[in-house]
Image: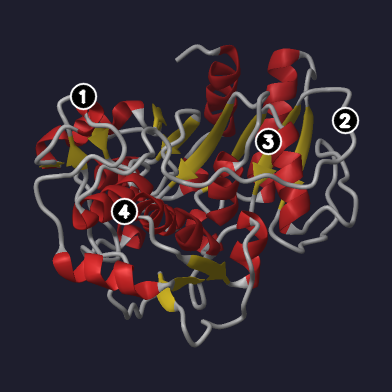
Amino acid sequence: MRLVRPALFASTADASALRDRAETLPYDRDLLAAGAALPLRDETFLDALVGAGSIYFDDRETPLGDALLGLSHFEAIRDAAVLLGLPLTATASPKIAQLLGIPAATCPPDSAMPLSFGPVRTGLLVPRPDLPPFRTPARIYADLPSRRYLDVERRVGLRLPKDRFFLPTLSGRLSARRSRPLICYIAASSWPARKDYGARGFALVARRINAMTGRRFDHALIQGLENRRETHPPFVRLPRKSHDIASLLGLFTQATLIIGNDTGLLHAAAMTKSETRLGVIGIYGRHSYLRFTTGDCRQYAISTPFAQAMALLDLSPIRDGFDDARYPHAAPVRRIAPEFIAECALRVIEGDL
């Protein structure tokens, strides 16, 4: 494949590109029932889980996106405890606890074993860094949530119950029903200079979609949590109280399509339960769209050539020392034409993939 232009990818369907780089599981989980014993296990990890009694999801010093993708590890620990018949109390930081509906604590309780996802990870139950993709005869597990879930599965030596989606499903505060289908645009970013398509860019996308469809859609711009900056046409004005996480999840539930930067709110959108949503499209400039995604079958990626290379080689610009700033012809997301993003959006809406 020649990586010469941005392209649209289905994040799960394109994982086959990593087949030769994936580690083969020593068992076929598709043929095993939940709870089945696996060939090997990590006795140290298993002993730590048996003796834990309480765990705490510690996302301090952790960006929202990293914390959300880390929830598969948290889910795997809880699933393993159920299969083993272990009493396990789970708490989390207030932000994550609100999303999961579990008790909140601002710091780990004295008796709890922390599961940390920031730059400093301590404890026997923390996720291992730099996990490879895994493979079975039927599937490549390339997304980070599936890698972490299956790593816990291997370490406890039991086939865990989740099959296709390894993250919890989120729900939010529903708002009034809308008269027209809604497209949301997420302009928040942890690194605006490198990862942000920009409010102006998304406005051009929205206008192009209007021109191509005869204005069939409403468009909403989201510029971050608690961000109440005024928006202007073609974006509808959102209520001033609609920028907390619960309200944004409710808005995502109503959206037909969500387009956004590669950021935490994009992952939150893909994790939100919705019966009407047709897809979530992330715009990737520097990170792998195969690794840094939720694994939902309706999540897609528009990827620059630089991010395509990171995906197909399973590389990370930080871990492997690739500075995307040195590839100005291949990495900036703002080089992607709004017309191309609009065309991709309509392909997802119309099922033309």
The colour scheme applied to this rendered structure is: secondary structure
Residue that appears at 37% across and 42% down:
289
- Cα distance between the residues tagged 2 and 1: 41 Å
Whichever of callouts 2 and 1 sits on the residue coming sooner in the sequence is: 1
Q: Earlier in the sequence, mark 3 or mark 1?
A: 1
Disc 3 from disc 1: Cα separation: 41 Å
For residue 49, side relative to residue 183 (left or right):
left
Within-10-Å neighbours for mark 2: few <14, some 14–19, many 20+: few
Q: Which residue is mark 3?
A: 204
Point out the frontmost of discs 3 and 1. 1
Task: Determine which residue is flagged by label 2.
Answer: 177
Residue at numbered disc 1: 138
Q: Is residue 285 visible?
A: yes
> Is 277 above or below relative to 326?
above
Q: Does 193 appear above or below 106? A: above
Q: Residue at x 69, y 40 (%)?
A: 252
Dot 3 and dot 4 residues touching (CB under 8 Å): no
Disc 2/disc 4 C-alpha distance (Å): 37 Å
Q: Is residue 75 left or right of residue 315?
A: right
Three-letter code, disc 3 = Leu
Query: Element under label 4?
Result: helix
Residue that label 4 marks? 148
Identified by mark 2, the residue type is Arg
Sequence-earlier tag: 4 or 1: 1
Residue 178 location in percent, x, y?
87, 28
